[in-house]
Each structure stands twice: as structure tokens, then as C-alpha cells.
Amino acid sequence: MKTNGNYNDLIEEVIYGLNGTDTIEIDAPEDDIDIVGDNHIGTSIDTPLRDDAFILTDEDKVEIIKGHFEQIMLTLGLDLTDDSLKGTPNRVAKMYVNEIFSGLNPDNKPKISVFDNKYQYNQMLVEKNINLNSSCEHHFLPIMGKAHVAYMSTGKVIGLSKINRIVDYYAKRPQVQERMTVQIANELKEILDTDDVAVVIEAKHMCVSSRGIQDESSTTLTAEYHGKFKDEKVKEEFLKYLTLELK
């Protein structure tokens, strides 16, 4: 599907392509694509986005997704005249655009202000058990877990709630857990102007527990260490804090 940059034409082309009368060419063989997805393999540090990803407004995207999700429901044999189902396509479309995938839109990136470290606190700051809700980009099923974040100030600090907002922003998009861990760490490094950052994420993937192997007990752990956190003693101290039970 090729776009010519014209806004109205783009809307028509998106609808045209997604209706199945046109296709977006993918170079990789279908078997290779399934192997990547079924094994939850990421392909890049950056979230894969087309160059024209933000030509459509959120309202346009809601309308387009609404129509296509309606077709999915009809294909599954559901009766959309039923009072319980008739509003579902619109609800799902708004949920995708405005909530669970809102992190795709850079306009939703949290505005982070940094402050001088007037307390001269030079030890690690750890915020653990940050609630994390994301979605697997291979099956669009939930990823649910906790993020644990630490940094050492080199002169700048941020409000604690801003760490939560950064985690939430990168979680609110189709994700691979490894990529999400790296993205959160890189964002903190840039904002705080320090390499001394650590991020650990432990999460449960519904694409593992509710389909495929259907393993309901396993969780996935990823970690990203930079600067002083690569030192084994510093890393050990950080991980020790994650096991403390605060009274």
C-alpha cells in the first residue's frame, strides 16, 4: 500500500488496504514471520512505526478501527444487533487509540521537568513495584507485571510519579518486553543526563498463559543496567532492595 501524502487519499488507502482488496507487501516468508511472532522475538529497539503513522487523527483512527473490528465480529458469527454487542466495535476502537495503545502517539509523551539535586543525595534512588500493563505485539494480548527502576543522580532529579508515567508511556503500545525495558532505561538516561540507570521488569504474558503452551505459572524477567549499575556490588545492592518487605 503506497501513500501519496494527501490526507483524504490516505484515509481511503488505509480503509482500502485493510479491507483486504489491497495488501501491504512483506518481504519475509510467512513461515519466518510466524517463527518470529510465536517465539516473541523483537526486531528493533524502536517501536516499528510507518513514516505516515500520525497523518491520521485519533478520531480518524477510531472510525477506521471501529469498522474493521465490526467486520471481525461479524466474521466470527456474532450478532451485532444484540444490545450487549452493538457498541463493542466503537468501545474497542476508542480503547485501542485512547488507552492501551496511547503510547504510540508522541503527543502523549509525559512532560518531565528535572530539578537540581539540592539535597546532594548521591546514593541510588529505587522505585519498585511500578504497575505495568502492556500488550504483546505478536498477538495483541496483555502483558501484566511490575517494573523496578533505579538511578543515581549526577545533579538532576525528577518527581517520583514521573518515573511511573515514563513506564506507563512505553507500556501503552504493542511491545516486546526486552524492547520496553531498553526504552524505559534510555529515556531515563536522556532525561536525567546520567548513565547510572537500572530497570528490571517482571511480567506475565497472556500470549503464553492463555494460548500456545498455556503455561499459567511462568513469568518473564528482563533487566537493563547502565553506568555504575554494571558494577556487581552496586547491582547486588539494587537487587537486594527489590526483595525488602517494607513495614
Image (cartoon, rainbow, N blue to C red):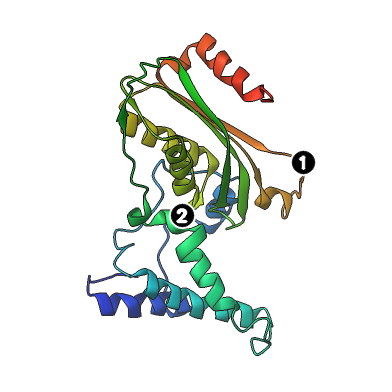
Residue 73: image quadrant is bottom right
Does residue 120 appear left or right of residue 7 in this picture?
Answer: right
Does residue 133 appear left or right of residue 1 in this picture?
Answer: right
Q: What residue type is labelled 2?
A: Ala
Of marks 2 and 1, the one in the foreground? 1
Q: Which amino acid does label 1 sit on?
A: Ser
In this rendered view, identify the residue nearer to me: 222 or 62. Answer: 62
x and y percent of residue 63 in the render?
44, 78
Whether residue 69 is visible to the viewer of this picture, yes or no, is no
x and y percent of residue 146 in the render?
60, 39
- Residues at marks 2 and 1, CA–CA distance in whole angstroms: 33 Å
Q: How crowded is mark 2: few (under 14 residues within 10 Å), some or many (20 or more)?
A: few
Tell me what residue is drawn at x 40 percent, y 67 percent. Answer: 24
Secondary structure at numbered mark 1: loop
**Residue 217, which numbered label?**
1
Q: Mark 2 points at which residue?
A: 28
In this rendered view, identify the residue nearer to me: 16 or 171. Answer: 171
Tell me what residue is drawn at x 76 percent, y 45 percent. Answer: 215
Q: In which quarter of the image is the N terminus?
A: bottom left
Q: Residues within 10 Å of mark 1 (few under 14, many from 20)?
A: few
Does residue 193 appear left or right of residue 40 in this picture?
Answer: left
x and y percent of residue 84 in the render?
68, 81
